Amino acid sequence: MGERPLEQKTCKACNTCLEANRSKEAKVRAQVLDHYGWECACCGDPQAEFLQIDHVDGGGSQHRKEIPSTYRWLIRNGFPDGFNTLCANCNVGKHINGGVCPSITHEGRYMTASSRVITETRAEAL
């Protein structure tokens, strides 16, 4: 079989297939977020584009290597405990902060970075 010309490297249906796949994956993700929540469990951020599924007790990296799709695995396994929704900032912050989201104070209250600055400024004024 000969090489196809550069303009024919992909089929005409590829963009259609790609869009259909994106739509299916968005529905699967929405089903998972419907169960685990549409806002960050730490800071309360509701921005859907930033939301991720967190392995509460860690181990997400290893788990992702063992399964093809976290979202589909969660659905197939009946939305097991041990997972929650975090925004990207809290998820990364939790990872680099030894498993504790930096948005949580030692009293267990939730704070955003801006409220932390206000609280610190008020404490200095006293």
Image (tube, rainbow, N blue to C red):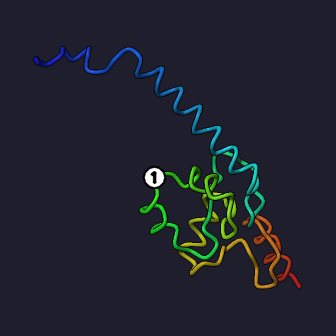
Residue lying furthest left: 2
Taking the spot 31% from the left edge, 21% from the top edge, the residue there is 10
Q: In which quarter of the image is the C terminus?
A: bottom right
Measuring from the top left, give residue 120's x and y in whole percent.
78, 78
Q: Quadrant location of residue 30?
A: top right
Towards the viewer: 111 or 44:
44
Q: In screen coordinates, is 57 left or right of 36?
A: left
User: The residue tagged with tag 1: helix, strand or loop?
Assistant: loop
Q: Quadrant location of residue 119?
A: bottom right
Above/below status of 7 relative to 38:
above
Taking the spot 57% from the left edge, 55% from the top edge, the residue there is 73
Q: In screen coordinates, is 110 left or right of 52?
A: right
Task: Judge the density around disc 1: few (<14), some (14-19), many (≥20) Cα neighbours within 10 Å.
Answer: few
Residue where numbered disc 1 is placed: 68
Q: Quadrant location of residue 11?
A: top left
Amino acid found under the numbered disc labelled 1: Pro
**Count of labels shown?**
1
Measuring from the top left, give residue 99's x and y in whole percent.
60, 78
Measuring from the top left, give residue 104's x and y in whole percent.
74, 75
Taking the spot 60% from the left edge, 65% from the top edge, the residue there is 91
Above/below status of 51 relative to 21:
below
Above/below status of 88 relative to 113:
above
